[in-house]
Every structure is written in C-alpha cells, then in structure tokens.
Image (spheres, helix red, strand yellow):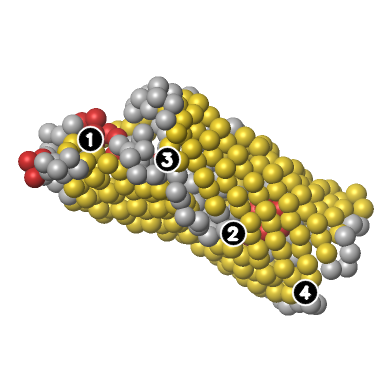
Amino acid sequence: MKKIVTLVTICLPFFLNAQGFQVSLQGQKQQAMAGAGTGLITDGAAMFYNPGGVSFLKSNSINVGVTHVTSHSQFVDASSSKVSETTSPVSFPFTAYAVFGKKNSKLKYGIAAYTPFGSTIDWENGWTGRFVLTHLQLFAVYVQPTISYKINEHLGIGAGFVYGSGKVNLQRDIPVTDSKGNYGHAELAGNAKGYGFNAGMYYQPVKSLSFGLTYHSDVKMKTEKGTATFTVPASLSSSFPSGNFSTSLPLPKIITLGIGYTPCKRFSLAFDASMIGWNTFDTLTFDYEKNTNELQDTKSARNYENAYAYRLGGQYHVSRKVDARVGIKYLVSPVKNGYVGPDVPDATHFNYSAGLGYQLSHHITADASFTFQHMKRMDTNKETQMSGTYKTNIYMPGISINYNF
C-alpha cells in the first residue's frame, strides 16, 4: 500500500514545470526569435525579459497576447511494445503588459501578467501508466509590478515584484478493485501561491550593440490545504481517508545573459544564454493531514540538476510595415536518467520558431509567432519502474496586439 501512496506523488512535479524547465511564452516578438529578448529590447515584454531595458522604450504601450498550445505525447512500453497516446485538449497561455512614463523621462513603470507554467494532459483510458497518471490540469499566473530607471544614455536598471498564483488537478488510477472489477482512483486538487522578484540591467555602449543581464529569483509555491480524494473499495476507505494535504514546491532561479546586435538598420540579432537552478528540487515532500499505516507522509526523490538554455533569433525589417523573425533554441533537460515520467516526459532538444509583425496603424501593431518542439527520450523510472520511450510534439502558434501612445 505504501507503494500506491508513493505513486500519487509522482505527478506533482508538473506543478513546477509545464515541460520540465523554463517555458518561454512571454512575448510574441521574442517567441518568434526563440525566446531571446534579454539583450534586445523591442516592446513591453521587456518587463519579463529584462526590466532594466524598459526605460529605453521610446513610448508607452499596452500589449496583450495569447498562445494556442497543442501537444501530443506517445509512450511505447519497453516490455510489451504497446503504444499509448494522450488525448489532451489545447491550452491558452496569455500575456499582458502595460508600460507608462512621462515623455523623455528616465523613469518607466508598469505591470505585467503572464502564465509561465500551464498544461493539460489526458492519457487514453486504460493506458500502460494509468497507475502513475491519467489526467493533469495546471494553470499558473504571475503578476509583476515593475519599475525601470535609465541611469544615463547607456545604462538602465529595473526590478519587479512577482506574485504567483496557481491551481492544479492531478488524477490516476489505484491498483485495487471493487467487486465489479473497477479500479480505485486518486484525485489531488489544490491552490498554491508564492513570491519572488525579477531584476535586470541593460547596457548599450554603442547604438548597434547592447547587453542584458536578468535575474529571476526562485519562487517557493506553497499549497497549504489541497484536497486529496481517494475512491477505493469500502474495505479500504479507512486506510485511505480523503482529506487535506500540504506541500512546498520550489520554482528555480533563472540567470540570463543576453546580447543584441544591429549591424544595419533593417537587421537585428539576439542571443540569450540561461542557467536554470533546478538543483534545488531534490526531494518532493508530501504531508497528509490524516495519516494511517498505509497513508504516510512521503518524500520522493527528484534529484534535478541545473539546466541551460541557448537562444538565437533574428529580426528583419522587410518594409515600413512588415517585420520577419526567426529563431532556434537548444534546451538541456534537468531531468536525470531514472526520473523521467508521464508527467515530465522531458529531453534535451531543439525548438524552432518564426513569426511576422505588421503595423496596422500609427499606434497599433500585430505580432504573430509559431514554435515547434519535438522531444524523444527512453528511460526506466527508478520509483515506478515504468520503462519505455516517450515522444512528444508541441505546436505553439500565437498572436499579440500592441498599442503605443
């Protein structure tokens, strides 16, 4: 029975990481350039990518955007060669940025709201890993008031306070049956919140070259009173009492160095290199309000390691109204061998992206992006003993509207 309880905790890491590491869906211009935006400041999304560069924006603005995320995962069992697939619905991470400041002022301020973590996964009925995960729904929102100051014509600094709020629903079957042969079921649902900050510095020694450095602090998301619901045969109900649970989930710090280079008026390049401090996520502790001999508080090893991301993007000013963008990103997975599962079927991989910007009027522009991500990894999980190959394709088209004033 203790093994059954341990399996429940396997799902929880997804609350931390929609894809096992940093998700870059915080701005359509930046998404089209593989998520590079720390050293090249283009719009209000700089509040996320580099608060120090916000003070270099020439106008105030309001920017709203959304990304349509469609994912499909497949698992091929190593022993039986059985293929299982997800039937996941789409999700819609959004962004909203508002930047204000007096004309010619060195001081800019604003507020940002974005969804850095979010996913919905449904594995098909009766799939191989039904006792590990059947359903996951995650939604997290960060709100970030921000201030930025231009010290001189070459250097700007900025910072923002981050408030994070999230919801999660995780479900899986339990390997016990009632008199009709129906398996038991576990559902974990809860809210979480946490606090942090985002600080950045932007340096432009010459007009064609700029540098950025951003620090996203770690955010410890705490669930104080989540609800654990166990549907089991009546004979086991006292062993698996439904009730509250609590846990603390550490989101990692992220340090990013960015470079922007504009060799000519029409063409710009952006490069970002990030270190994501996943090594703080070594153990997942799960505290039940009601304990029994079978339902004990658990600690599940994760042993994540620090990961790195490299992003390269370019922007070309095609005409007075049209900009074209393209990018490629290389992501190193923090999930070690032996810890891959259906909640985080992660792998080191490349992402590919492209996009267009169009000036609708003097004050309004529209930007669109498309990102494709493919992951493949074979592993045997040390805790669940699930062994096989995961294949995942993710398609992410998005659009935003920006109003300058």
Q: Which residue is mark 3?
A: 343
Could you say which is closer to the camera, residue 307 or residue 105? Answer: 307
**Can the viewer see residue 48 in this picture?**
no
Numbered disc 3: secondary structure: loop
The spot of residue 347 in percent (x, y) is 55, 33
The spot of residue 74 in percent (x, y) is 48, 38
Single out the mark in the foreground, 4 or 1: 1
- Mark 1 to mark 3 CA distance (whole Å): 19 Å
As shown in the figure, which amino acid type bears the numbered disc 2? Thr
Q: Which mark is residue 67?
A: 2
Could you say which is closer to the camera, residue 144 or residue 75? Answer: 75
- Mark 3 to mark 2 CA distance (whole Å): 21 Å
Q: Which residue is mark 4?
A: 360
User: 102 left or right of 233?
Assistant: right
Numbered disc 1: secondary structure: strand
Q: Earlier in the sequence, mark 1 or mark 2?
A: 2
Q: Which residue is mark 1?
A: 175
Could you say which is closer to the camera, residue 184 or residue 243? Answer: 184
Q: Residues within 10 Å of mark 2 (few under 14, many from 20)?
A: many
Quadrant of the snapshot with the C terminus: bottom right
As shown in the figure, which amino acid type bears the numbered disc 4? Leu
